[in-house]
């Protein structure tokens, strides 16, 4: 996710002055994405800069390799009410029929899962606004109960056996309250616009508002998603587009995600979309799904292809085999895997925010936190990369960014807690962004860019498509640097005070 519009380094200073209500930013000099001369030269009227609308590529569906989705599910330490560690979901096969006039979702789901342990029953998360009809386990009808957002399936499961849970459900999905005080989102999950269009952002949870899911990040799974929507609307989800047809009334689009994703990285958007594309120098096609007629913001959005090249130069090859971006009616931005979800605003569609969400494809998506106490693993490295991007693209010099972030760090710890032990009702506050970014920058300075990014890359290679913990990454950096870093990491991630600059020597 992107940080709120105003870098908190500035808001921290504002807060000290007792003007918290201006946390959305009045200091134009520091916060407005300043266009560099080259950016200013290309405006929306520059025809070369606008990629023509094009037909999207259709990729034939493949048989999913369920073995790639094996996980070690855990109970979340921050949000234990969501998810069930008895379940290791492997594949979600969803068929979604959206009626925008009735605001009605009619759906069927097949969840293929491994039992992570033997148990007399198990549960998935599924929004209370959805009514479950037929439900079967391996083809046999079984009993179930709804308890709030829990769908409890009353059937025994045996450790390491695989099962197929099938169900039909119907209703008007309702977004879930978000455990945050951020100004740019207050709910998560399935969101319906005034015109009946749909978008979803679901960090740290909220996937359950529209499908039955083990909604905790340690359980990565594959996805096959088919969406039916009235023409000319299109449903967008993660991965490859494998079908795009219509029968004169209804558009059917099918999507296949062939590398496993945590549920908070899944996206669904339904609306009146047009498609365009460009390609990175490294040869990755980037698909853009934008509201029909959208002009403002296209230019920033389509910097994504160049940003892929920039990120690859530091973090190594793009980790997946497709990439798209979809623009929705939200206010924030989310790194949904292989299909980034962006709100339709100048700030969210700025090159540095687009780059931020793309960096997450490496830090956050390819390698994800197993527990929400480690969301700083995503945002720290990504924020540092955003700062470097801003510096190298003449948006904001790194030196001033670091100076301000350092000045604001103690205030963030005081207000929200240290990044690795934050207040559960303050999810996504700036402490999980700036504080770990400062920490990584200390290591970058101590090691030099070449060594720092070598280690940052090897971490990704060693942990491809997994969910990890802070102990895993601490050990990686200690091994690779040959330095004793436990005190350094602890001070930055769980300490109450901003650490002094510097990194212990080897
Ligand atoms: Zn982020």
Image (cartoon, grey):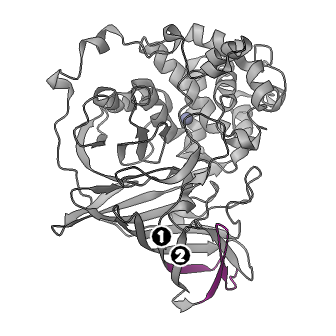
**Compared to 473, does 224 lie above or below?**
below
Q: Residue furthest bottom?
A: 140
Q: Residue at x 71, y 65 (%)?
A: 85
Q: Nearer the viewer, residue 133 or 266?
A: 133
Q: Left or right of 75: which side holds 358?
A: left
Q: Nearer the viewer, residue 377 or 476?
A: 377
Of the image marks 1 and 2, the number of the one nearer the N terminus: 2
Which segment did they paint magenta? 142-167
The image shows residue 486 at horizontal and vertical percentages of 82, 31
- State the CA–CA distance, disc 1 to disc 2: 6 Å
Q: Is residue 411 visible?
A: yes
Other-residue count near label 2 (Cα within 10 Å), few / some / many at <14 / 14–19 / ≥20: some
In this figure, what is the number of numbered marks? 2
For disc 2, does the CB lie below 8 Å from ligand 1?
no
Disc 2 secondary structure class = strand
Using the rendered view, name the quadrant where residue 313 is placed.
top left
Tell me if label 1 and label 2 are in contact, CB under 8 Å. Answer: yes
**Compared to 25, does 312 lie above or below?**
below
Question: Which quadrant does the N terminus fall into?
Answer: top right
Q: Main secondary structure of the magenta part?
A: strand
The image shows residue 305 at horizontal and vertical percentages of 33, 32
Q: Nearer the viewer, residue 20 or 202?
A: 20
Question: Which quadrant does the C terminus fall into?
Answer: top right
Disc 1 secondary structure class = strand
In the rendered image, which residue does mark 1 sit on? 171
The image shows residue 177 at horizontal and vertical percentages of 62, 51
In the rendered image, which residue does mark 2 sit on? 131
The image shows residue 86 at horizontal and vertical percentages of 70, 70
């Amino acid at each position: 996710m992107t940080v709120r519009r105003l870098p908190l380094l500035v808001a921290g200073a504002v807060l000290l002055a007792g003007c918290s209500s201006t946390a959305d930013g009045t200091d134009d000099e520091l916060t407005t994405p300043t266009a560099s001369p080259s950016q200013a030269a290309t405006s929306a009227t520059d025809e070369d800069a606008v990629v023509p609308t094009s037909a999207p590529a259709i990729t034939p569906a493949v048989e999913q390799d369920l073995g790639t989705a094996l996980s070690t599910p855990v109970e979340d330490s921050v949000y234990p009410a969501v998810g069930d560690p008895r379940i290791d979901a492997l594949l979600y096969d969803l068929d979604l029929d959206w009626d925008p006039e009735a605001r009605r979702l009619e759906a069927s789901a097949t969840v293929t899962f491994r039992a992570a342990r033997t148990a007399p029953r198990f549960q998935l998360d599924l929004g209370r606004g959805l009514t479950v009809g037929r439900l079967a386990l391996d083809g046999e009808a079984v009993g179930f109960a709804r308890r709030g957002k829990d769908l409890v399936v009353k059937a025994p499961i045996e450790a390491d056996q695989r099962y197929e849970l099938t169900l039909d459900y119907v209703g008007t999905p309702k977004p879930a309250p978000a455990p945050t005080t951020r100004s740019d989102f207050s709910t998560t999950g399935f969101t319906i616009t005034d015109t009946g269009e749909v978008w979803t952002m679901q960090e740290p949870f909220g996937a359950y508002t529209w499908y039955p899911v083990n909604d905790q990040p340690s359980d990565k799974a594959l996805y096959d998603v088919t969406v039916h929507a009235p023409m000319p609307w299109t449903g967008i989800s993660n991965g490859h587009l494998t079908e795009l047809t219509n029968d004169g009334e209804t558009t059917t689009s099918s999507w296949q995600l062939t590398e496993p994703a945590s549920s908070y990285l899944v996206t669904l958007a339904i609306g009146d979309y047009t498609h365009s594309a460009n390609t990175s120098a490294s040869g990755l096609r980037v698909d853009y799904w934008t509201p029909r007629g959208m002009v403002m913001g296209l230019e920033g959005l389509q910097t994504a292809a160049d940003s892929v090249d920039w990120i690859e130069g530091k973090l190594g090859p793009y980790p997946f085999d497709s990439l798209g971006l979809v623009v929705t009616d939200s206010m924030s931005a989310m790194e949904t895997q292989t299909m980034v979800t962006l709100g339709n605003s100048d700030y969210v569609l700025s090159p540095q925010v687009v780059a931020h969400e793309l960096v997450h494809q490496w830090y956050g998506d390819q390698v994800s936190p197993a527990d929400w106490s480690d969301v700083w693993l995503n945002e720290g490295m990504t924020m540092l990369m955003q700062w470097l991007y801003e510096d190298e693209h003449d948006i904001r010099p790194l030196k001033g960014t670091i100076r301000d972030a350092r000045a604001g760090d103690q205030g963030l710890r005081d207000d929200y807690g240290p990044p690795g032990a934050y207040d559960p009702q303050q999810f996504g506050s700036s402490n999980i962004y700036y504080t770990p970014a400062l920490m990584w920058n200390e290591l970058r300075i101590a090691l030099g860019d070449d060594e720092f990014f070598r280690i940052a890359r090897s971490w990704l290679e060693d942990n491809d498509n997994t969910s990890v913990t802070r102990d895993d990454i601490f050990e990686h950096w200690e091994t690779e640097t040959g330095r004793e870093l436990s005190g350094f990491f602890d001070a930055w991630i769980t300490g109450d005070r901003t650490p002094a600059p510097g990194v212990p020597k080897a």
